[in-house]
Image (cartoon, rainbow, N blue to C red):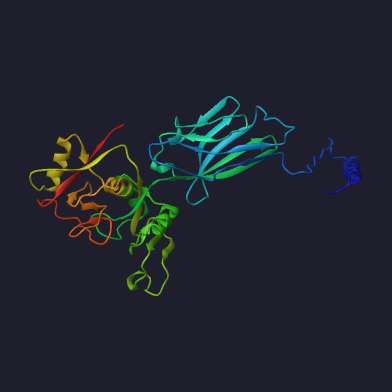
């Protein structure tokens, strides 16, 4: 640290230079902070987990020099980082009495405000799209600080392809396909967590950052080679318009009831749709079946129609003649919709 005399000499030197320069009409003042910034922000924990339909508080605490007090012009801004980290989506801004929420967050976010130095963000009625990383930024005059907090959702990742067959989705088709099944395109973090949970799937699929990857727990020849190590294989970033793959979708808890509709006889697809409707429900979506299976332990050995025209059944307790080796959502393909061979899975939503 420089001695006090050196600070005085530095100030005199700057003043002398200003006096010799006729173009400078105003004196310059230099502020030197010896002990670092007077404002910073911190968060503990850096990762928060919640569920769809629930609430979450993203922590952000302001730390200031004890001799300072927050000014009325202090600005607190929360943004959501996109998957490519190049763009930010505005979430909430607060300055004095002025507060504003943006886009899909409007009316669902506010500051906890337990103290003048509490900038924590409360998100209510959480949606699938709320998953991700959020930045808390605090600006007070010339001082500022930022911290990033992650919001994770309890849920399940599942591979998906439509009736058209495998490798028929560009990125935008993949987004629509997941959305149609009550899901979103999974992030890398979500796929990696699913791989750690033993998800093994040999088909390459889109992720939310525009990359194409697939999880392998048991290396084998058609899936990168049997002598390779387990992991999430990657094709890297691909052209979102021109390249076609499957997709990995993510879904979470829902508000409603998923169930198998007991009928006296098997149904065609159209009959299954009508039967669910007559029961005050809708034919269930693939994401709803995966959520019921993974998060609620739903178990049923009856193959049934789903909204996309596929036939599947969820098995949580492996047993003979019903997924004997593993718990899984069993897939029976996309049969002819006129085949009167299957039951129906329905979903009855509620607020």
Estimate the x, y position of residue 15 in percent, counting from the top left: 89, 40
User: In the figure, 236 relative to 103: above or below?
Assistant: below
28 vs 310, nearest the viewer: 310
48 vs 286, nearest the viewer: 48
Query: What is the residue that sits farthest to the bottom in this orientation?
Result: 227
Residue at x 49% of width, y 52% of height: 84
Residue at x 41% of width, y 67% of height: 230
Left or right position of 136 against 236: right
Please tell me in which quadrant of the rendered image residue 271 appears: top left
Left or right position of 268 against 25: left
Please tell me in which quadrant of the rendered image residue 278 appears: top left
136 vs 327, nearest the viewer: 327
Estimate the x, y position of residue 83 in percent, counting from the top left: 47, 50
Residue at x 14% of width, y 40% of height: 275
Residue at x 53% of width, y 44% of height: 149
Query: What is the residue that sits farthest to the left in this orientation?
Result: 265
Estimate the x, y position of residue 52 in percent, counting from the top left: 38, 40
Left or right position of 243 against 136: left
Q: Quadrant of the C terminus?
A: top left
Left or right position of 90 against 24: left
Estimate the x, y position of residue 222 in percent, counting from the top left: 32, 71
């Amino acid at each position: 640290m420089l001695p006090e005399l050196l600070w005085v000499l530095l100030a005199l030197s700057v003043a002398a230079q200003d006096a010799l320069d006729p173009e400078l009409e105003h004196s310059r003042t230099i502020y030197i902070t010896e002990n670092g910034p007077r404002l910073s922000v911190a968060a503990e924990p850096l990762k928060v987990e919640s569920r769809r339909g629930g609430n979450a508080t993203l922590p952000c605490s302001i730390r200031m020099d004890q001799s300072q007090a927050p000014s009325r012009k202090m600005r607190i801004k929360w943004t959501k980082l996109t998957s490519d980290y190049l763009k930010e989506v505005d979430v909430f801004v607060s300055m004095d009495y002025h507060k504003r929420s943006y886009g899909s967050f409007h009316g669902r976010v506010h500051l906890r405000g337990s103290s003048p130095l509490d900038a924590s963000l409360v998100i209510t009625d959480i949606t699938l799209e709320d998953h991700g990383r959020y930045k808390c930024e605090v600006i007070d005059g010339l001082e500022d600080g930022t911290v990033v907090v992650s919001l994770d959702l309890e849920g399940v990742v599942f591979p998906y392809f439509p009736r058209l067959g495998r490798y028929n989705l560009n990125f935008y088709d993949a987004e629509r396909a997941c959305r149609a099944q009550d899901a979103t395109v999974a992030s890398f973090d979500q796929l990696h967590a699913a791989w750690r949970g033993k998800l093994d799937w040999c088909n390459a699929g889109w992720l939310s950052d525009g990359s194409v990857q697939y999880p392998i727990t048991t290396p084998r020849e058609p899936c990168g080679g049997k002598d390779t190590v387990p992991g999430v294989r990657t094709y890297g970033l691909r052209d979102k318009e021109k390249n076609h793959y499957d997709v990995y979708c993510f879904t979470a808890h829902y508000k409603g009831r998923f169930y198998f509709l007991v009928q006296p006889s098997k149904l065609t697809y159209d009959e299954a749709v009508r039967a669910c409707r007559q029961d005050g429900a809708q034919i269930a979506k693939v994401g709803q079946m995966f959520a019921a299976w993974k998060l609620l332990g739903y178990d049923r050995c009856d193959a049934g129609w789903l909204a996309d025209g596929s036939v599947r059944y969820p098995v949580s307790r492996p047993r003979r003649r019903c997924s004997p080796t593993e718990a899984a959502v069993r897939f029976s393909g996309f049969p002819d919709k006129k085949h009167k061979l299957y039951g129906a899975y329905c979903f009855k939503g509620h607020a």
